[in-house]
Amino acid sequence: MTLPPEFSLIARHFRPLAGPGSLDLRDDAALLTPPPGKQLVLTVDAMVAGVHFFADDPPDQVGRKLLRVNLSDLAAKGATPLGYLMTVSAPRGTPDAWFAGFASGLAQDQAAFGCTLLGGDTTSTPGPMSLSLTILGTVTPGLSVHRFGASAGDGIWVTGTIGDGALGLQVALGKLADGSGFLLDRYRLPQPRVGFAIGGIASAGMDISDGLVQDLGHLCRASNVAATIEAASVPMSEAARRAGSEWLQTRLTGGDDYELLLAVPPAHEPALHAAAAASGIPVARIGRCHAGPPSVVVEGQRGEALAFDKGGWSHF
């Protein structure tokens, strides 16, 4: 019996991505037994063409970004990837080569980060391409990191460099030159900080997807603390430095970093440095939490409060 087009597409491109528990993508559900002594962590993110990626972006990079933005959420919980469910809604007439490239990108990052496809759904849509991925991870009970839990006196730390993704979007829009290609690559391919053992070290944390200032505000509200950060202490890449100081607001509010934002008690800083060294992930202290109504103040070179037009990306 000939397979219907949808099932033929799944067999060609997605079944090779399937792993244990997926039932070889031949059923309506997956069966999964978590490792002994572990809790499951689940998170979901969606990407829409024209909003989160460009319709003409290379399909392998679209697949990798879809997986990586979800892996970043797991990293912020201190969790280890296990597997994922995915839905793909593509306009009719999407070339088979697009799906082949998309699946190739997923396969590349599955191998890099240690997870497999468990199941999902494929549909056609009259609108732009819409992708959604729900990832599952595991964590030792009691070691999951939450947005809430920060206290006055905690230092505010970030991984990597901040603002590259937002500047990369400006490169893609033709508003900023970047001869190295570094910034555009950072926009298209986030670097999820999987493997950074922050459980028991960070009192609170999350990944930075909607802009440093806005996401720190989310952490402050959840923890009922205020925060001050020093603009000069926020780490930047050499490519961002070359872009110039006029892009400061974009760097701090633009989003698409997918770096980790952590509140760390001073007593835990040696453990933070040890975990960072063990994972090869750079960290930098950029400010502090203090008592007060939830708020975020960004200080300039002379300690003055900087005013920005917006705090970050809005989904609505």
Image (cartoon, grey):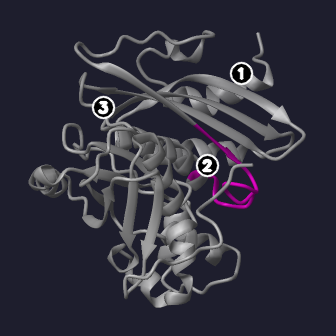
Determine which quarter of the picture holds residue 66.
top right
Residue at horizontal 70 percent and vertical 35 percent from the top: 88
Across and down, in percent, residue 249 comes to 56, 76
Which residue is at the front of the view, 69 or 147?
Answer: 147
Write down the residue under mark 1: 7
Residue 151 can be seen in this image: yes
The stretch of residues the image draws in magenta is: 45-60
Marks 1 and 2, how far apart in space?
Answer: 18 Å
Asked whether the beta carbons under mark 1 and mark 2 sit within 8 Å of each other, the answer is no
> Residue 101 bears which disc, if any?
2
- Tags 3 and 2 in contact by the CB under 8 Å rule? no
Q: Amino acid at mark 3?
A: Ser
Rendered location of residue 212, percent (x, y): 48, 61
Farthest right residue? Answer: 126
Q: Main secondary structure of the magenta part?
A: loop
The residue lying at 55 percent from left, 67 percent from top is 253
Q: Which residue is mark 3?
A: 144
